Image: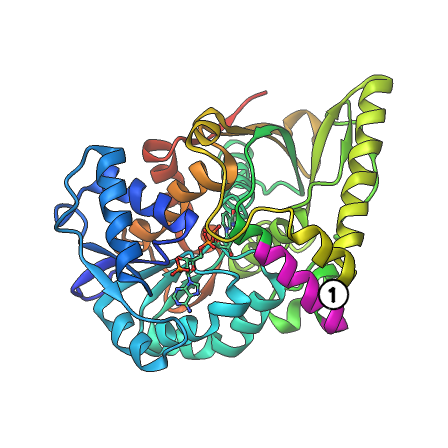
Amino acid sequence: MQKTAREFEVVVWGASGFTGKLTAEYLLARYGVAGVLRWAIAGRSAAKLEAVRDDIARETGCAASALPILIGDGDDDAFLDTLTPRTQVVCTTVGPYAKYGSKLVAACVANGTDYCDLTGEVHWMQRMIETHQDAAAESGARIVFTCGFDCIPSDLGAFFLQREMRTRHGVACSRIQYRVAGFSGGASGGTVASMLLMMEEAERDPAVMRTMNDPYALNPKSERSGPDAPERTSAAWDGDFQQWTAPFVMAGINTKVVRRTNALLGYAYGKAFRYDEAILMGAGPLGLAKAVATSVGTAAMMGAMRIGPLRRAVSGRLPQPGDGPSKQKREAGYFDIHLRGEHPTDASKSLRGRIHGDRDPGYGSTSKMLGESAVCLAKDAISVAGGCWTPASAMGERLLTRLGENAGVTFSIGE
Ligand SMILES: NC(=O)c1ccc[n+]([C@@H]2O[C@H](COP(=O)([O-])OP(=O)(O)OC[C@H]3O[C@@H](n4cnc5c(N)ncnc54)[C@H](OP(=O)(O)O)[C@@H]3O)[C@@H](O)[C@H]2O)c1
C-alpha cells in the first residue's frame, strides 16, 4: 500500500548524531538531493545540522546545499505534530529511544506517518507496541523498529532461509541457527548510552528485567509462549557447526524480533519454530578456551552493568554521545554470519546460508540498512497496513533486494 505524496518522502531525525550523520551521508551518496528522493535532515541544532550538510557534501562529493534542514526539539509535542505530517517516513537515530523516542512514535501514529529506527530497547518496544498498535492500525502508520545490525541480519536472514526452504522443499525450517563467524567494528556513545539506560531501568524495575528475559516478550500479548528458552549464557558445543560457541550479546534482542516476525506472519515458520544465536569460536581445546573466556567475559560485563556504582564507574571510560568508530575502522569493518535451517523431517535437506556485510556492523552497515529501510517504506509497494511491524514482516522481499543491490549486505545459500 503506497501513501499519498507528502512534502518529503524521508526525514532523517537526529542527523547531527553519529549514526544519523552516516545515514544522511549514505542517502546523499545514493539518492542525491531533490532528485529520486525528496528528503530532509532534522534535529534540534541548526548550527550542527548545517555543519553536517557541509561535511556530507565534502565526504561524498555530492552537492547538498539544497538539502532542507528542519529544526525542533524531540520533547516538543507541538513541533512533532507539525513535523510528522510533512513527511511520509521519519527515520530516527535519536536514542536512547526509551528516553527520547516515545513522543515521536506517538506523533507518527497520530499523523499516519511511517517510522523506522535503530532501537534495541526491548522493554520500550514492548511498551510502544502495547500503547500504539491499535491506533497505528487505524491511522495507517507503519512503525518499524530495529532497522540496524540489530535486527535486520537476523530477521531478514531467517526470512530468507525460510523462503529458500519453502521454494526448494515446500516446507518451513523447523529450526534456524544464526552463528556469528566474524565481525570487525566498534561502539558509539549513543549505543553505550542506550545499553546503560536499559540496565538502569532493569535495576529500578524488575518488570523490565523480566521482559528482557522473556524469549517471546515482543509477541502479541496473548501469544507469548513457544518452544524456545531464554538465551544461553554459557559456552556450548554446536555439533551442527562442529565448533564451540559463546553467547552473542545481541541475541536477546534479535531472537525476540525473529519470533515476533513469525507471529506477525501468521506463524509462517510454524508454531514449533525454534531460533537461536551464538558466536562461533572454533573447534578443539583452543575453541573451548575462547568460548569459555568470551562467555565469562560477557556474563561479567552484563553483571557489572546491572549494578549502579559499577555501571557509573565504567561508563566514563566508554564512548560518549556523538563519538563512534573512525571512518578507517568502519571501512575496514565487516560482518559474516552463518545460518543453518533445519528441514523438519529430512536432515539431508537442511540448508546452510550466509549473510555478509561490507562495512562494520554497528555504523557503516547499520546506516545503509536504516537508510534503505526508510526508502523502502517510502517508495516500495509493500503490502502491510498500519501497525507495529518488524523489518521482515513489513518489508521482507523488497528490503532483501534493496540491501543486496545497494547496501552491501548479501544473503546467500551455501557454506
Ligand atoms: N540497532 C543498531 O544496530 C544500532 C546501531 C547504531 C546505533 N544504534 C542506536 O542509535 C541511537 C543513536 O546512536 P548514536 O551513537 O548515533 O547517538 P548520538 O551520536 O548520541 O546521537 C544522538 C542524536 O540524538 C539527538 N537528540 C538528543 N536529544 C534530542 C532532542 N531532545 N531533540 C532532538 N534531538 C535530540 C542528538 O542531537 P544533538 O546533536 O543536538 O545533541 C543527536 O543527533 C542509539 O540509541 C543507539 O543505541 C543502534
Residue 71 percent location from the top left of the image: 26, 66
**Secondary structure character of the magenta stretch overall:** helix
Residue 221 percent location from the top left of the image: 63, 72
Write down the residue under mark 1. Answer: 209
Determine whether 191 is above or below 3 in the image.
above
Residue 146 falls left or right of residue 42: right
Q: Quadrant of ligand 1?
A: bottom left
Residue, x 52% and y 57% (percent of image)? 119
Residue 60 percent location from the top left of the image: 24, 34
Farthest residue to the bottom: give it.
78
Q: Which residues are magenta?
A: 193-207
- Which of the image's four quarters has the C terminus? top right
Disc 1, SS:
helix
Q: How many residues crowd around disc 1 within 10 Å: few (fewer than 14), some, or many (20 or more)?
A: some
Residue, x 74% and y 27% (percent of image)? 240
Q: Which residue occupies the foreground of this view, 227 or 218?
A: 218
Residue 384 percent location from the top left of the image: 37, 61
User: Is there any visible trace of residue 314 in the rendered image?
Assistant: yes
Residue 127 falls left or right of residue 396: right
Q: Which residue occupies the foreground of this view, 183 or 88?
A: 183
